Amino acid sequence: AQSVTQLDSQVPVFEEAPVELRCNYSSSVSVYLFWYVQYPNQGLQLLLKYLSGSTLVKGINGFEAEFNKSQTSFHLRKPSVHISDTAEYFCAVSDPGGATNKLIFGTGTLLAVQP
Amino acid sequence: EPEVTQTPSHQVTQMGQEVILRCVPISNHLYFYWYRQILGQKVEFLVSFYNNEISEKSEIFDDQFSVERPDGSNFTLKIRSTKLEDSAMYFCASSDSGGTAHEQFFGPGTRLTVL
Protein backbone atom coordinates (compact mmCIF):
# COMPACT_ATOMS: atom_id res chain seq x y z
CA ALA A 1 0.00 0.00 0.00
CA GLN A 2 1.11 3.54 -0.69
CA SER A 3 1.22 6.46 1.71
CA VAL A 4 2.23 10.12 1.47
CA THR A 5 3.73 12.32 4.17
CA GLN A 6 3.74 16.08 4.14
CA LEU A 7 5.55 17.02 7.31
CA ASP A 8 4.86 20.75 7.15
CA SER A 9 1.26 21.66 7.85
CA GLN A 10 1.98 25.34 7.27
CA VAL A 11 4.83 27.20 5.60
CA PRO A 12 4.98 30.98 6.03
CA VAL A 13 7.17 32.83 3.54
CA PHE A 14 7.70 36.39 2.42
CA GLU A 15 6.76 37.50 -1.05
CA GLU A 16 9.53 37.00 -3.67
CA ALA A 17 11.35 34.50 -1.43
CA PRO A 18 11.97 30.91 -2.58
CA VAL A 19 9.93 28.09 -1.10
CA GLU A 20 10.11 24.32 -0.87
CA LEU A 21 7.18 22.16 0.19
CA ARG A 22 8.22 18.70 1.21
CA CYS A 23 6.61 15.42 0.21
CA ASN A 24 7.77 11.91 0.95
CA TYR A 25 6.03 8.75 -0.11
CA SER A 26 6.09 5.11 0.78
CA SER A 27 5.40 2.37 -1.74
CA SER A 28 6.52 -1.14 -2.56
CA VAL A 29 5.94 -0.47 -6.26
CA SER A 30 6.75 2.38 -8.60
CA VAL A 31 4.27 5.22 -8.47
CA TYR A 32 3.03 8.23 -10.31
CA LEU A 33 3.39 11.45 -8.31
CA PHE A 34 1.25 14.58 -8.33
CA TRP A 35 1.01 17.98 -6.73
CA TYR A 36 -2.41 19.61 -6.47
CA VAL A 37 -3.23 23.13 -5.27
CA GLN A 38 -6.42 24.32 -3.65
CA TYR A 39 -7.14 28.03 -3.61
CA PRO A 40 -9.74 29.28 -1.12
CA ASN A 41 -13.25 28.08 -1.94
CA GLN A 42 -12.09 26.25 -5.05
CA GLY A 43 -11.47 22.64 -6.07
CA LEU A 44 -8.14 20.85 -6.28
CA GLN A 45 -6.16 21.85 -9.37
CA LEU A 46 -3.28 19.85 -10.82
CA LEU A 47 0.05 21.71 -10.60
CA LEU A 48 2.31 19.05 -12.05
CA LYS A 49 2.85 15.32 -12.29
CA TYR A 50 5.70 12.85 -12.58
CA LEU A 51 5.06 9.72 -14.60
CA SER A 52 8.51 8.73 -15.90
CA GLY A 53 11.60 10.16 -17.58
CA SER A 54 13.26 13.35 -16.39
CA THR A 55 13.17 13.63 -12.63
CA LEU A 56 12.68 17.42 -12.77
CA VAL A 57 9.11 18.27 -13.62
CA LYS A 58 7.85 21.74 -14.41
CA GLY A 59 4.28 22.75 -13.77
CA ILE A 60 1.98 25.71 -13.94
CA ASN A 61 2.55 29.05 -12.18
CA GLY A 62 6.34 28.64 -12.08
CA PHE A 63 6.36 25.59 -9.82
CA GLU A 64 8.64 22.61 -10.29
CA ALA A 65 9.26 19.38 -8.43
CA GLU A 66 12.04 16.85 -8.38
CA PHE A 67 11.51 13.13 -8.06
CA ASN A 68 14.17 11.45 -5.94
CA LYS A 69 13.72 7.71 -5.93
CA SER A 70 16.45 6.95 -3.40
CA GLN A 71 14.94 9.37 -0.90
CA THR A 72 11.36 8.59 -1.95
CA SER A 73 10.69 12.30 -2.17
CA PHE A 74 8.89 14.66 -4.52
CA HIS A 75 9.47 18.14 -3.13
CA LEU A 76 7.77 21.14 -4.71
CA ARG A 77 9.74 24.33 -5.26
CA LYS A 78 9.29 27.84 -6.55
CA PRO A 79 12.15 30.33 -6.78
CA SER A 80 10.05 33.41 -6.06
CA VAL A 81 6.54 33.30 -4.61
CA HIS A 82 3.70 35.76 -5.00
CA ILE A 83 0.86 36.67 -2.68
CA SER A 84 -1.43 34.84 -5.10
CA ASP A 85 0.38 31.55 -4.37
CA THR A 86 -1.23 31.47 -0.94
CA ALA A 87 -3.14 28.18 -0.98
CA GLU A 88 -3.21 24.61 0.29
CA TYR A 89 -0.86 22.25 -1.56
CA PHE A 90 -1.44 18.50 -1.68
CA CYS A 91 1.02 15.82 -2.73
CA ALA A 92 -0.50 12.58 -4.07
CA VAL A 93 0.51 9.24 -5.55
CA SER A 94 -1.20 6.63 -7.67
CA ASP A 95 -0.30 3.09 -8.60
CA PRO A 96 0.39 2.68 -12.33
CA GLY A 97 -0.68 -0.94 -12.07
CA GLY A 98 -3.76 -0.28 -9.96
CA ALA A 99 -7.29 -1.22 -10.90
CA THR A 100 -8.32 2.42 -11.03
CA ASN A 101 -6.39 5.64 -10.82
CA LYS A 102 -7.37 6.48 -7.28
CA LEU A 103 -5.15 9.08 -5.72
CA ILE A 104 -3.59 8.75 -2.29
CA PHE A 105 -3.03 12.16 -0.75
CA GLY A 106 -0.93 13.70 1.97
CA THR A 107 -2.46 15.95 4.63
CA GLY A 108 -1.60 19.12 2.75
CA THR A 109 0.65 22.12 3.37
CA LEU A 110 -0.73 25.61 3.71
CA LEU A 111 1.57 28.06 1.95
CA ALA A 112 1.06 31.49 3.51
CA VAL A 113 2.78 34.23 1.53
CA GLN A 114 3.24 37.46 3.43
CA PRO A 115 3.99 40.88 1.91
CA GLU B 1 -13.21 26.29 -19.22
CA PRO B 2 -15.23 23.23 -18.19
CA GLU B 3 -15.28 22.49 -14.48
CA VAL B 4 -16.71 20.09 -11.95
CA THR B 5 -19.43 21.62 -9.80
CA GLN B 6 -20.80 20.44 -6.47
CA THR B 7 -23.91 21.31 -4.49
CA PRO B 8 -24.50 22.29 -1.82
CA SER B 9 -21.31 23.99 -0.71
CA HIS B 10 -22.23 23.36 2.93
CA GLN B 11 -24.70 20.83 4.34
CA VAL B 12 -25.68 20.63 7.98
CA THR B 13 -27.64 17.60 9.13
CA GLN B 14 -28.66 15.75 12.24
CA MET B 15 -27.09 12.41 13.11
CA GLY B 16 -29.08 9.56 11.60
CA GLN B 17 -30.43 11.59 8.71
CA GLU B 18 -29.85 10.80 5.06
CA VAL B 19 -27.87 13.22 2.90
CA ILE B 20 -27.27 13.38 -0.81
CA LEU B 21 -24.28 15.26 -2.13
CA ARG B 22 -24.47 16.24 -5.75
CA CYS B 23 -21.82 16.64 -8.40
CA VAL B 24 -21.90 17.59 -12.05
CA PRO B 25 -18.74 16.19 -13.69
CA ILE B 26 -17.20 17.58 -16.87
CA SER B 27 -19.53 16.63 -19.70
CA ASN B 28 -17.33 14.31 -21.78
CA HIS B 29 -15.75 12.55 -18.81
CA LEU B 30 -16.50 8.92 -18.13
CA TYR B 31 -14.76 8.21 -14.81
CA PHE B 32 -16.03 9.64 -11.55
CA TYR B 33 -14.70 9.68 -8.02
CA TRP B 34 -15.54 10.75 -4.50
CA TYR B 35 -12.94 11.69 -1.92
CA ARG B 36 -13.33 13.14 1.54
CA GLN B 37 -11.17 15.11 3.94
CA ILE B 38 -11.86 15.13 7.65
CA LEU B 39 -10.60 18.37 9.15
CA GLY B 40 -6.84 18.21 9.69
CA GLN B 41 -6.51 14.80 8.07
CA LYS B 42 -5.61 13.40 4.66
CA VAL B 43 -7.79 13.57 1.58
CA GLU B 44 -9.07 9.99 1.36
CA PHE B 45 -10.35 8.04 -1.62
CA LEU B 46 -13.89 6.75 -1.22
CA VAL B 47 -15.04 5.29 -4.52
CA SER B 48 -14.53 5.29 -8.27
CA PHE B 49 -17.34 4.78 -10.78
CA TYR B 50 -17.36 3.89 -14.44
CA ASN B 51 -19.98 2.61 -16.86
CA ASN B 52 -22.69 2.81 -14.22
CA GLU B 53 -20.93 0.66 -11.69
CA ILE B 54 -18.39 0.95 -8.92
CA SER B 55 -14.85 0.23 -10.12
CA GLU B 56 -13.17 0.38 -6.73
CA LYS B 57 -14.11 1.39 -3.22
CA SER B 58 -12.20 1.95 -0.02
CA GLU B 59 -12.81 0.46 3.41
CA ILE B 60 -14.53 3.72 4.36
CA PHE B 61 -17.20 3.16 1.71
CA ASP B 62 -19.42 0.80 3.69
CA ASP B 63 -23.09 -0.06 3.30
CA GLN B 64 -24.10 3.40 4.52
CA PHE B 65 -22.70 4.91 1.34
CA SER B 66 -23.96 4.63 -2.21
CA VAL B 67 -23.29 6.38 -5.48
CA GLU B 68 -25.48 6.90 -8.47
CA ARG B 69 -25.50 8.54 -11.83
CA PRO B 70 -29.24 9.20 -12.08
CA ASP B 71 -29.07 10.97 -15.42
CA GLY B 72 -26.49 11.98 -17.99
CA SER B 73 -25.08 14.83 -15.97
CA ASN B 74 -25.29 14.26 -12.22
CA PHE B 75 -23.22 12.01 -9.98
CA THR B 76 -24.42 11.66 -6.40
CA LEU B 77 -23.10 10.36 -3.12
CA LYS B 78 -25.71 9.25 -0.60
CA ILE B 79 -25.08 8.62 3.06
CA ARG B 80 -28.09 6.74 4.46
CA SER B 81 -27.72 7.36 8.16
CA THR B 82 -25.13 9.97 8.96
CA LYS B 83 -22.77 9.66 11.90
CA LEU B 84 -20.77 12.35 13.64
CA GLU B 85 -17.60 10.98 12.09
CA ASP B 86 -18.99 11.57 8.60
CA SER B 87 -18.39 15.29 9.11
CA ALA B 88 -15.85 16.18 6.43
CA MET B 89 -15.27 17.97 3.15
CA TYR B 90 -16.40 15.75 0.27
CA PHE B 91 -14.75 16.21 -3.13
CA CYS B 92 -16.06 14.92 -6.42
CA ALA B 93 -13.66 14.38 -9.34
CA SER B 94 -13.88 13.24 -12.92
CA SER B 95 -11.49 12.21 -15.67
CA ASP B 96 -11.74 11.31 -19.32
CA SER B 97 -9.79 8.10 -18.87
CA GLY B 98 -9.28 5.55 -16.18
CA GLY B 99 -5.56 5.30 -16.81
CA THR B 100 -3.53 6.58 -13.90
CA ALA B 101 -1.69 9.13 -15.99
CA HIS B 102 -4.82 11.05 -16.76
CA GLU B 103 -5.68 14.08 -14.72
CA GLN B 104 -8.57 14.07 -12.34
CA PHE B 105 -10.52 17.31 -12.24
CA PHE B 106 -11.90 18.18 -8.83
CA GLY B 107 -14.92 20.14 -7.71
CA PRO B 108 -14.82 22.76 -4.92
CA GLY B 109 -16.18 20.33 -2.35
CA THR B 110 -19.19 20.07 -0.06
CA ARG B 111 -18.61 20.59 3.62
CA LEU B 112 -20.82 18.18 5.54
CA THR B 113 -21.45 18.89 9.21
CA VAL B 114 -23.25 16.22 11.22
CA LEU B 115 -24.66 17.40 14.57
Image (cartoon, coloured by chain):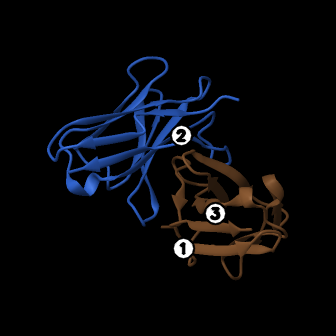
Element type at mark 2: loop
What x and y, as percent, mark residue A1? 48, 67
Q: Residues within 10 Å of mark 2 (few under 14, many from 20)?
A: many
3D distance between C-alphas at marks 1 and 3 = 23 Å
Name the one closer to the observer, B2 or A66: B2
Which residue lies under the disc numbered 1?
A: A9
Calculate the distance from the C-alpha at mark 2 to the C-alpha at mark 3: 24 Å
- Density class for disc 1 (Cα within 10 Å; few <14, some 14-19, many ≥20) is some
| Distance from the alpha carbon under mark 2 to that under mark 1 | 23 Å
- For the residues labelled 2 and 1, say whether their Cβ atoms are less than 8 Å apart: no
**Chain that appears brown:** A
Which chain does the numbered disc 2 sit on? B
- As drawn, is B80 to the left or to the right of B101? left
Given residues A68 and A42, the one toward you in this image is A42
Colour in which chain B is drawn? blue
Q: Earlier in the sequence, mark 1 or mark 3?
A: 1
Q: Identify the element where label 1 is drawn.
A: loop
Q: Residue at x 56, y 48 (%)?
A: A101
What residue is disc 2 on?
B107
Task: Kindly identify the amino acid type of the residue bearing the numbered disc 1.
Answer: Ser
Q: Check the residue under mark 3 and report the chain it is in.
A: A
The label number, if any, that marks residue A31 in the structure image? 3
Front residue of B38 and A106: B38
Residue that lies at the very extreme toward the front in this rendered image: A115
Residue A85 location in percent, x, y? 72, 59
Amino acid beneath label 2 = Gly
Residue at (43, 39) in percent of width and height: B9
Picture layout, residue B16 above or below residue B20: below
Residue A108 lies, with reference to residue B20, above or below; the image says: below
Residue A32, disc:
none
Residue B50 position (above or below residue A95): above
Callout 3, which amino acid? Val
